[in-house]
Image (spheres, coloured by chain):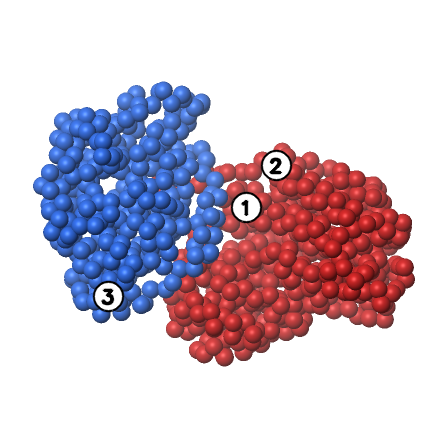
Chain colours: A red, B blue
Amino acid sequence: MTDFDYAPALESRSIVTIESEYGHFINGEFVKGANHFPTINPSNEEVLSQIALGGAQDIDRAVASSRVAFESTWSKMPGKERGKYLYRIARIMQERSREFAVLESLDNGKPIRESRDIDIPLACAHFFYHAGWADKLEFAGVGSSPRPLGVAGQIIPWNFPLLMLAWKIAPALAAGNTVVLKPAETTSLTALLFAQVCQQAELPAGVVNIVTGDGRTGSALVDHPGIDKIAFTGSTQVGKAIARAIAPTKKKATLELGGKAANIVFDDAPVDECVEGIVNGIFFNQGHVCCAGSRLIVQESVAEEIVSKLKVRMSKIRVGDPLDKNTDLGAINSAEQLSKITALTKSGEDEGAMRWSPECALPKKGFWFAPTVFTGVTQAHRIAQEEIFGPVLSVLTFRTPQEAIEKANNTPYGLSAGVWSEKGSRIHWASQQLKAGVIWANTFNKFDPTSPFGGYKESGWGREGGSHGLTAYLKSAEEGGNNE
Amino acid sequence: MEFYGLVDGTEISLRKFLQTLSGVDQIGAEARAAMLATRSIKTSAKNWAIDLAISMVDLTTLEGADTPGKVRALCNKAVRPDSTDSSVPSVGAICVYNDMVAIARKHLDSIGGSHVPVAAVSTAFPSGRASMAVKIQDTQDALDAGATEIDMVIDRGAFLSGQFQVVFDEIAKIRTLCGTKAHLKVILETGELVTYDNVRTASFIAMLAGADFIKTSTGKVSPAATPPVVLVMLEAVRDFHQLTNHKIGVKAAGGIRTTKDAIKQLVLVNETVGSQWLSPSLFRIGASALLNDLLMQRMKARDGFYPSPSYVSID
């Protein structure tokens, strides 16, 4: 052996117990579903379990249960007591973090390093953070006696299943709302494990209801008249449909939608850390990140150096078994997503951009896509405009700072952006010009429960995280409402 | 071409070159090193890494209390680290003060260890606070005594006060003195340079002036060979190779005490400069206690259980 070949270092999956079939979690109990669909491990297409397909009736029962819990228990409970439940949930999640991490990697395909070091710790942090808010709501910025909204319908995506659950449930519960949550069709397992945590924490029945299913289940939830607020994370297309559906109603909404983030590199950027940031920006979580830095906008004078270093770095990315602790890039979540990525990258080639991937052996079974970079991309290319939601980076260049900003803002989206420069004044200037909800300076894809996250334009409505996110689940006493 | 044709020995050319270097973002560099520290090296990969690490150890004793007897004992250990197992490779070198060089060289040759080089610390090690004449004499003594590797320290005072050319000239002079007789390792003492920007700048000054190796630390100052410092130096070496096609080695010294620490260093090498540097000719680990931990881990792999420390010779 002359090369340093890392031997397989597999995380044991024996820590998780996966039932052969799951029902919904309604009113504190698991109830059988009528119909089921399989959930698979995207890294090898193994069927992990059968998930219940929720219908209008299941949604109805769940909303009714949440309404009763809201009116009889949760909204009446002193904030301090609600906080105790949230702390308890957070601690149990921490204790069971290994279990959550393995299950997340099995069901989603993301590397265990990321589920273990990022997804699960951040999900716990969201519960801890919001637990602290529960008895301090009068300082959230909506008047001296803020009220909860009522029953929140929450629909989450498949890219960060447990983390998005935490982003949704933690602030809702802290503010005194009850929730009906629908996990994504392909990634329900950690939400169902979370349901067990709710039981373990002895959370009052009905405060959290979880109904699994597909898009139809989601639209039944959106359309249900007993819902006071919709919180959705997912595609812009579905977000628009939700906005249309609730327009004639009193339902409030927060929508966290797509993105096509610009990662702007100036000629004085710290090169190695910048290359690291580019890699983290687009290859983190297989690029299944709404705020992924999918457009690299680099100053022409350093473009060659940055791209050549990026390619060297990309050839070190370890693609493979998500449960291997040394894997950097896991499986694409579904066959459907893989075909979307494949189609969009083909359009990139057809439109004349230069495609490059490092040599890497992809597993035969499962859904896989090698890390890919396109150079010679222009604003007119589809791969510069459309969200690919995969490990595919488009590289564009600029000559003047103004041009960088114009290109960065030339998109219907506006979720996030990155700025790389050693010059503080330039970073501040660029951040003021960029139309994006989150801007990272000399880093990328950093998340914290205290920091509001959300987009401009078609990237969404409202913010999640921080006091901004909390107020989306509160109303002032003056707003009144039907829950008093 | 002298100085790789990148500088011409004048201060203005050195300053101009150093201005072309990009900065290092502290948070980013530390995050990258921390991420690489999560690599899980097990079974066959671990066994391979342990033997490689043993062959990279510069087995060191740099104490005021060093005696000929102590140095001879260390030489025995260097040639045959585990007397019960002849498959264990010899270490990379013996590293001593220059008055011990002749003793070490003679003893190594007498026990079949002529393949193990002797490295001498030099130029008023560890502080570097002496006149250039003393530093030159110090180095000459070591060369005369048979040292084939010179571990010199840079003048950190000069570096921190911005006199980069002074640092450069000292290294260049010692380089000339070593000629083809000895490999030159230049100790940056990163714990005193403090910032990663300084580490990168000092790495380039040393490489331009003729270092064969750049070395983190004397072992007398803490922090020493932290993973982010070694990462930044490896990146400098990689960039220098791209610029000149010359491969400069890196020696991580100070604070590397366990097999786990050593393997983390090898992972940094592997994923920053690549497998070409995974050789004692381009990567060394300066240590004393590390060797025994490597040996114990090796016994564990062979026998299936951890030996008592009593089964490993203390020196």
Residue A235 spot, x, y in % from top left: 69, 63
User: What chain does mark 1 sit on?
Assistant: A
Question: Are circles 3 and 1 on residues that touch, CB within 8 Å?
Answer: no
Give the quadrant of residue A194: top right
Asked if badges 3 and 1 are on one and the same chain, I answer: no
Percent x, y of residue B268: 39, 47
Disc 3, SS: helix
Taking B263 as reference, is B308 above or below it?
Answer: above
Residue A13: which disc?
A: 2
Q: Nearer the viewer, residue B2 or B157?
A: B157
Q: Can see residue A462?
A: yes
Mark 1 — residue?
A113
**Chain under numbered label 2:** A
| Residue beneath disc 3 | B14
Q: Is residue A131 left or right of residue A293?
A: right
Taking depth in this image into account, of A108 and A477 the one nearest to the observer is: A477
Q: Which quadrant: the C terminus of chain B?
A: top left
Position of residue B143 measured from the top left corner of the image (x, y, whole percent): 12, 43
Q: Residue B169 appears in which quarter of the rendering? A: bottom left
Q: Amino acid at mark 3?
A: Leu
